[in-house]
Amino acid sequence: MKYTMNRRELLAATAFAGATLAFGSRAFAADDAAATLKGSGKVVVSTWGGSYVDAQTKVFFKPFTDATGIEVVTTGTPDAAKLKLMQQSGNVEWDLLDAEGQMMLLAAKDDLIQKVNYDLIHKVTPADDLLTEALNEYGFPSVAFGWVLTWNTDTYKSGAPGNWADFWNVEKFPGRRAVYANPRPLLEVALMADGVPHDKLYPLDIDRAFKKLDELKPHVSVWVENTGQFDVLLQNAEVDMMMGSLGRSTIAKGKGLPVDYTMNDGLWQQSYWIVPKDAPNAENAMKLIAWMSQAQNEAEFVKIYPYGMPNKKSYDLMSAETKANIPTSPQNLPMQAQIDAAWWTANNEEVNRRWLDWYSKR
């Protein structure tokens, strides 16, 4: 199966369900799912920290525990190298990881993860409800998440930045800058800042991207190495402008913090729930995936985090305002660039060697 999301299928589900019918269906589905997924013990989930894991806990993890009796324990950031080391040492500590597309493909290639139990998922969520092209035999779609240009509205009270070229323009937009210390999607951002159209990004011109990054490097105040750090930067107004998470930026703005962002030149990519090959609680991990696949659960999560979801019926339950902040919605998709996980999988080692050498000299 393909790993990429079918945009037309994603955007097709826009009609709203009748309130009474929807409520009755949700209540029945939740009770039925709880009975199907009952269990004991725990499941250890490696995810991304901060407000993101807070939202996952509120919408997915705690209700799952309440309904099934299976405890959910969250732990630190998903890491392909750490997963491989766990597998080699025979001491796998994680049961479920919220992995970016590239990590999923690499882990499957290295035989580090097991196939998803779609038979179990389909007992809770009918196969026809899922975006077929988003599925993978080794990963179940978690979120299609986005990266955006975010700024402090107290700093730029008029004439705010509108694209990545503005992010590079330190004379017109002076201020402290923060970027994610990872070549993906920083290389894509650099190329867009240099004028490369969204549909011409791949294959990435690595030389051109690093040359553009050389211009920005002296003006970066904060290199974000853990995505949870974005929450702190936004909360404390430590920077004036950043390459940030759409979800975290949306939450900060919703809290009334001096934060705004643009969907223009945004990037989005698909993430997947994956289960390590020797996960000690693999059965519970599959049950949690099945629980999270339900339309109502996904729609509730998107109220907090504006991410694309794999259940088509979840879009029937979203408000127009919510969908306006989803990177793959009809009004936003033309302004977005999709990160190509397959290209990154094929070029990961080469790019990372160059990145580490470049980053170490900052």
Image (cartoon, rainbow, N blue to C red):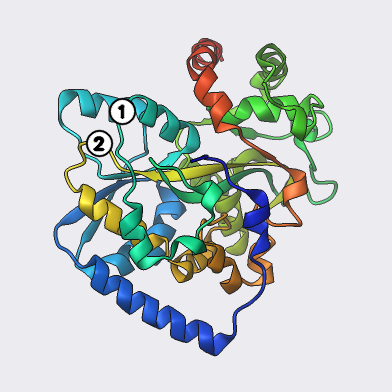
Q: Position of residue 60 (x, y in %)?
A: 37, 63
Whether residue 44 is visible, yes or no, is yes
CA distance for labels 2 and 1: 7 Å
Mark 1 crowdedness (10 Å alpha carbons): few <14, some 14-19, many ≥20: few
Residue at position x 68%, y 53% in the image: 8
The amino acid on which the numbered mark 2 sits, given as a three-letter code, is: Lys
- In the image, taking residue 116 as reference, residue 181 lies left or right, namely right
Please say if the residues under marks 2 and 1 sit with CB atoms less than 8 Å apart: yes
SS label for mark 2: loop
- In the image, taking residue 28 as reference, residue 256 lies left or right, namely right
SS label for mark 1: loop
Residue at position x 66%, y 50% in the image: 7
Is residue 221 placed above or below 66 in the rendered structure?
above
Quadrant of residue 193 in the image? top right
Frontmost residue, 252 versus 310: 310
Quadrant of residue 358 in the image? top right
Q: Position of residue 56 (x, y in %)?
A: 40, 58
Q: Position of residue 201 (x, y in %)?
A: 72, 27
Q: Which residue carries the number 2 mark?
A: 277
Q: Which residue carries the number 1 mark?
A: 111
- In the image, taking residue 1 as reference, residue 81 lies left or right, namely left
Quarter in which the C terminus is drawn = top right
Residue at position x 15%, y 28% in the image: 90
Q: Position of residue 78 (x, y in %)?
A: 37, 37
Is residue 130 placed above or below 177 in the rendered structure?
below
Mark 2 crowdedness (10 Å alpha carbons): few <14, some 14-19, many ≥20: some
